[in-house]
Amino acid sequence: MCDTHEPSAPASVARRTLLRGAGGLVLAGGLVASGATAAQAATSQNGWSAGSSSQIPISGLTVSAASFPAGVRSGQVHTILGYVARRFNSEVEALVSGWCWGHNYRAISGSTTLSNHASGTAIDVNAPRHPLGATGTFSSTQRTRIHAILAYCDGVVRWGGDYSGRKDEMHFEINVRPGDPRLAALVTKIGGGGGGGSTTVVWTTVQRGASGFRVVAIQHLLRHRGYSLTVDGSFGPTTESKVIAFQTSRGLVGDGVVGPKTWSALVVTCERGAAGQAVVAIQKTLTHRGYSLAADGSFGPATESKVVAFQTSRGLVGDGIVGPKTWAKLTA
């Protein structure tokens, strides 16, 4: 794991120095925060909250044959760093299993400042091939391709190979504070926020007489929308009548057929922290697709990791958010 960062943070990021003492962390002004309070107050070099995977949202990240142990920060950061890793893998060099790293709660070596790895906002790629402090580990062509990836990211991502001091060519990190509008803009540009870069969403039509996992998903989604019915996986007259009632309530043609317009109105965008019947639908559908997990209706880290794995397997952005694009792939 790389253990350094650029000595001076970018202008858009103000550091918060944290000194470790016997009772916890000594903050600016001499205040001491101990235990969980200290961890909650901690921020990494780039201004993001830092902590263990139980204190900050972390999702698994896998690109091709390589997994990033401990994952990276969920949401926008996951979308962006996942995008960088995928382009690196396809345009710069193939990622090697066991050589890529993500979240790790620790300080920068020789410093009291928390590493950006501590907030899940940094990744290291093919680390043994590009060791800390080494220069020239990439060819000129590879460097050009890396800078093309960075240019696409509009300043949101910084590469350790561009540090003015000690180089860290394995390292990529988020270079803006939380809430910076460039984060959302880049996620939209990439095509995240619900899975996938394509703007086309193709739905599978389901109607009376059908049975199976799609019907189970529809029934759970109807229950989420307040329509009482038994989830039995059979699209019979009761399910049809509930579909018609839902359609008419949304100004759709009440034909009882769950096609693109009905699917679009019926699905619910879910992410980590969500709960209820829509989450049960996601969990059961993931299990049907081979991503086995308990259908407990709670969108926690296990469900999120399965969603990310499914998304990346389908060429979608692995942001862990089940939006229309991911729903359509799940029910295809």
Image: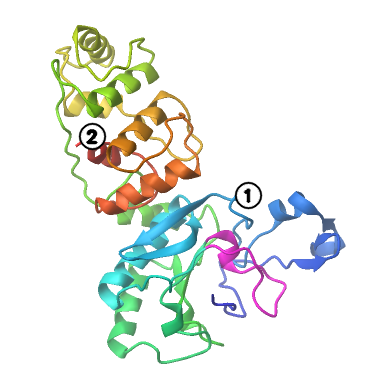
Residue 116 part of the magenta-drawn span: yes
**Quarter containing the C terminus:** top left
Q: Residue at x 45, y 25 (%)?
A: 276
Mark 2 or mark 1, which is nearer the start of the sequence? 1
Give the x, y percent position of residue 109: 66, 78
Q: Nearer the viewer, residue 304 or 195?
A: 304
Spatial CA span between label 1 and label 2: 33 Å
Which amino acid, by three-letter code, is at mark 1?
Answer: Gln
Give the x, y percent position of residue 237: 19, 7
Residue 50 appears in the figure: yes
Give the x, y percent position of residue 10: 56, 72
Determine whether 40 is above or below 145 in the image: above
**Quadrant in the rendering for residue 113:** bottom right
Residue 191 appears in the figure: no
Residue 2 part of the magenta-drawn span: no
**Quadrant in the rendering for residue 23:** bottom right
Q: For the magenta stretch, what is the residue range? A: 103-120
Q: Disc 1 vs disc 2: Cβ atoms closer than 8 Å?
A: no
Q: Residue at x 32, y 72 (%)?
A: 88
Residue at label 2?
331
Residue at label 1?
55
Q: Main secondary structure of the magenta part?
A: loop
